[in-house]
Amino acid sequence: MGFINFVLAISPIAFVLVGILAFKKPAMKVAPLALVWTMLLAFTYFNISGLTFQENVVVLDGLLWKGIKEGLKIVAMVFGAFVILNTLKRTGAIEDVKNTVARVSGQDRRVQLIVVGMMVPIFLEGAAGAGAPAAIAAPFLVALGFDPITAIAVALLGDATPCSWGGAGLTTINGGAALVEAGISTNALNSAMVGRIHMFGVLIIPFLMVALAFGRKGFRGIVPYLFYSGITSGAIMFLISNFVGPEITSMGTGLLSILLSVVYVKFVPIKTPEEYRYQFHKDARQQYSAFRAMSPYIYMLIMLPAVRYLVPMFVENGFALLCTFGYIVWVDVVIFICAILGALTLRVKKDELFEVFRMTARNVMPVLITMGSLLVLAYIMQAESTGMMSLIAGDIAALAGTLYPAAAVLIGSLGSFITGTGLGSNIMFAGMHTEAAATLGMNPITVFAGQNAGASLGNLICPNNTVAACATVGEVGNENKVMRKTLVAFAVILVEYMVLAMLYTLVLFPNFGM
């Protein structure tokens, strides 16, 4: 029965993956069917609370409306990001955006890929989080001329490490609260240990991005820069997470990495093969100044961290105010305001802007069906009335034994795969890991670090995030193409993190913070 319970509990996840990857069906068709199957399980096999049919309807009805509400919040962010991309296309400012980035980051398209695909998302995760990094970076990469599917996969990969801290360190601070409240750890210790894992993830991500976007031949002449960007970004992430604190780890790492990358390309020649050199159009006339062309993104880079940090600083209960309608809502509002300000700066006429709104709305509305279905599915699996997610994690933990630190990484990834957030995964499983570590005589701080790192990594393949990112560049229905790319990178980093979790817990830091 135990095996059957596990198989049925994990079947909604399998349904989504098989439908998207094996049958190559768009998520908009797979998600509602997976939800129907999950609801059937909730009414029958996993009605562990013994609820009557009417009581179950009440529970699931509440989860259904919660999924629709949260789905609307995500769609709102996608809408704002897509409005910016469509505005740049309509005005022709995209060409000036490309030229501006090429002048700042060098003419090597692979350098542009790393700066915009990895460093900008790390900064944006610290400035806002809530899915903003991929939703902004993917359209930006498309504006630079990258294939949309590749752009989405790279943007998701760039956000695979900083999610452990999220906006102002919330993922580690709130997610690790169970350890802090029990007197087992502190926010500083939790941040320090997960930083020691992620610094090795950041080290290899530039190589994974180039392989993903250009294949093996893409490494010609760029390997020294890839080592430089990986080592410097990893070192900065280590230093800030270990000696400053979780609040500014992501934002500080992203910002300093961008600056150091600009310094490198200015002073170290890169032997760029012609096929990877950004080509300026000889006959093209600069239509907009660099500031005007880049204005929507410049406004976001300023306003997102400004609102996030200044409102709590100068307004009483400021953070609670930002979270009044849910954390993601203020991010939605800021991105939309930046889209409007960008349109004004580019002097887009009112009629043209309304046409951009109409075109964007047509493109993103189908996302609500997908996002709502996936979110409700996740809420049902997490619900105490079904116990599905707890059963999955418990079975993996029971089977692991000595390999538990590696299992914690996998459980963390599964948690964010379902919930769509590293914070949700950490909150869900931090207590379980603490108890398991005590039973096995292991260090709970290093075990939780594995959970925290895995939770961040799981965002890379989360269907919710993939659908949202696809929507920002008009690729709804092509989620299978994106996931085929991201799954390979996910598997590589997952193995790396499992090995690190085992080494840290059993060999290198068995008494860390004890």
Image (tube, grey):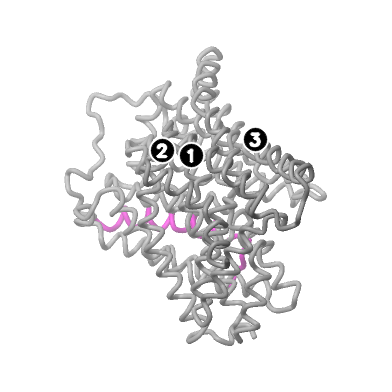
The residue beneath circle 3 is 333
Seen from the viewer's position, the closer of residues 285 and 300 is: 300
Mark 2 Cα shell of 10 Å, populated few (<14), some (14-19), many (≥20)? some
Quadrant of the image occupied by residue 24: top left
> Which is closer to the viewer, label 3 or label 2?
2
Query: Looking at the image, which residue is at 38% across and 53% down?
Result: 262
Question: What residue range appears in magenta?
Answer: 243-269
Report the side of 355 relative to 270 (left or right): right
| Residue type beneath disc 3 | Val
Q: Is residue 83 left or right of residue 290?
A: right
Circle 3 — which element? helix
Q: Is residue 314 visible?
A: no
Residue 103 part of the magenta segment: no
Inspect the image, locate mark 2, and give the three-letter code of the amino acid beneath it. Lys
Q: Which residue is mark 2?
A: 25
Q: Quadrant of residue 67?
A: top right
Q: CA distance from mark 1 to mark 2?
A: 7 Å
